[in-house]
């Protein structure tokens, strides 16, 4: 199994540009999550989804949008990139509510200049 | 809101010795789950160990064990017989049984000296 696949692994954006971070899982997990990791700050939840067609905001949703049209895919959209969005982004998925833990992708390092 | 605190930004241990990483959390709930994740330089988040709050017995996975003190809201990770491959960032995480959000601490960077 591939698990959780994130693309791209690295990206440099100019201020004001937009992009979509892709996330796909092949484990038939209902729950999917997007986190961002800033130095010394741990991981913070941006958005999550409990199933196809259902998404909800996490702790730091401003500047981001998500959609969940299929069980497998959970893309994260950045509109009008700002330097404050420079971070490492992780997608994760879990069976049910994740009480057995999450499976993480390998992350995307995004730099906004 | 639940918060997770890791008070040790960095720790160091000699190869083959034992090290304990600290974690405390704040919650008013009685049903929840606690985790330790390892993040090596590859950036991949790897689940190390998991504890259910309603179980008094401390979880153990090979060289990794926890000391779960529910009343004190403490969840420390003990690594025995440390190996060079244990060098990584370690994150403590809290997951409510009710809410759809896993909260992470700021992490502890573990260095293993040969």
Image (tube, grey):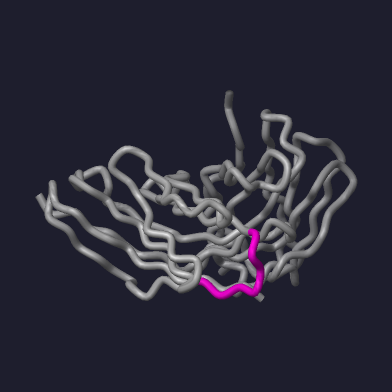
- Residue at horizontal 75 percent and vertical 63 percent from the top: A64
Q: Is residue A103 above or below residue B76?
A: above
Q: Is residue A2 left or right of residue B47?
A: right
Quarter residue A111 falls in:
bottom right
Quadrant of the drawing holding the N terminus of chain B: bottom right
Along the viewing direction, whichever of A112 and B83 lies nearer the viewer: B83
In the rendered image, the residue lying farthest to the top is A1
Magenta residue span: B25-31
Closer-to-camera residue (A101/A59): A101
Q: Is residue A16 above or below residue A91?
A: below
Residue B75 visible in the picture: yes
Residue A64 vs residue B14: left or right?
A: right
Residue placed at 48% from the left, 67% from the top?
Answer: B105
Q: Does residue A87 appear to the left or right of B65 in the view shown?
A: right
Q: Position of residue A56 (x, y in %)?
A: 82, 59
Given residues B87 and B61, the one toward you in this image is B61
Q: Is residue A83 visible?
A: no
Instruction: Work out whether B43 lies above or below B96.
Output: above
Residue B5 lies within the magenta run: no
Residue A20 position within the rendered picture, expressed as x and y whole percent measured from the top left: 72, 51
Asked if residue B26 is among those painted magenta in the image, a careful observer would answer yes
Q: Predominant secondary structure in magenta?
A: loop
Q: Residue at x 42, y 47 (%)?
A: B59
**Residue farthest right in this picture:** A53
């Amino acid at each position: 199994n591939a698990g959780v696949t994130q693309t791209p692994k690295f990206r440099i954006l100019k201020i004001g540009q937009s992009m979509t971070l892709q996330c796909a899982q092949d484990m038939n997990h209902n729950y999917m999550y997007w986190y961002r990791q800033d130095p010394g700050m741990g991981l913070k939840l941006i958005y999550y989804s409990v199933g196809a067609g259902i998404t909800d905001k996490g702790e730091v949703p401003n500047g981001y949008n998500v959609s969940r049209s299929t069980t497998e895919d959970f893309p994260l959209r950045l509109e009008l990139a700002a330097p404050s969005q420079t971070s490492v982004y992780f997608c994760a998925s879990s069976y049910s509510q994740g009480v057995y833990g999450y499976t993480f992708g390998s992350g995307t390092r995004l730099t906004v200049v | 809101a639940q918060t997770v605190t890791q008070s040790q930004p960095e720790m160091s241990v000699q190869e083959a010795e034992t090290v304990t990483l600290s974690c405390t959390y704040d919650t008013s709930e009685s049903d929840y789950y606690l985790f330790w994740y390892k993040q090596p330089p590859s950036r991949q988040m790897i689940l190390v160990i998991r504890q259910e709050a309603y179980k008094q017995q401390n979880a153990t996975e090979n060289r990794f064990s926890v000391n779960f003190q529910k009343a004190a809201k403490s969840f420390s990770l003990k690594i025995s017989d440390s190996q060079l491959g244990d060098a990584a960032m370690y994150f403590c995480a809290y997951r409510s049984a009710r809410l759809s959000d896993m909260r992470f601490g700021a992490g502890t960077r573990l260095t293993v000296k040969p």
